[in-house]
Image (cartoon, rainbow, N blue to C red):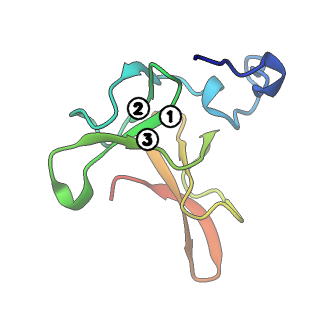
Amino acid sequence: MVTSVPASAQPPVPTPGAECHYPNCTPGIKPNVVLGSYCENTTYYVFGVTSWGRLVFCGSPRRYEPRWFRSPEMHGVKNQGDLCPGLSGEVAQAPDGLFLTCVSKDGRSYWERGDL
């Protein structure tokens, strides 16, 4: 049995030029990714979505060959260095496609490269 999420449960698609806080407005998300399969780029445009709608990212744990993994919560397009209070460990994409993660350090949380 296949069920779909009602349109009302989806975040709204923002108007052009508006801030992006969700995956649905993030450019460059690759469709039809197979969870666990090999991928190539762990730095730029790393997000994909499976055929059943699961958000994934291309990562290389301990510098092994990169694969598609389930993504932490994704917050759209953000700027490297901007604050991200309460989002530690969650991810985003910079306007140029750079993979970002929210890190907590020295009493503040901010968006940092996610491929390091």
What kind of element bears circle 3? loop
Image quarter in which the C terminus is found: bottom left
Most distant residue in the front direction: 1
Question: What residue would you read off at disc 3?
Answer: 98
Measuring 52% from the left and 50% from the top, which residue is drawn there?
72
**Residue that lies at the very extreme toward the right in this rendered image:** 8
The answer to whether residue 77 of the structure is visible from this angle is: no
First of labels 3, 1 by sequence position: 1
Looking at the rendered structure, the kind of residue marked 3 is: Leu
Can residue 2 be seen here?
yes
Q: Which mark is residue 45?
A: 2
Mark 1: few/some/many CA within 10 Å (<14, 14-19, 20+):
many
The x and y percentages for residue 38 are 21, 34
Q: Secondary structure at mark 2?
A: loop
Compared with residue 31, is residue 105 higher up or lower down, i.e. above or below?
below
Going from N to C along the chain, the mark reached first, 1 or 2, is: 2
> Residue, x 50% and y 55% (percent of image)?
101
In the image: residue 40, left or right of residue 9: left
Viewer-proximal residue among 39 and 28: 39
Q: Nearer the viewer, mark 1 or mark 2?
A: 1
Judge by depth and name the residue closer to the eye, 92 or 55.
55
Dot 2 amino acid type = Tyr
CA gap, disc 1 to disc 2? Answer: 13 Å
User: Mark 2 touching mark 3, by CB under 8 A?
Assistant: no
Q: Is residue 31 above or below residue 59?
A: above
| Residue 2 picture location, percent across and down | 59, 16
| x and y, in percent, of residue 71 in the image | 48, 44
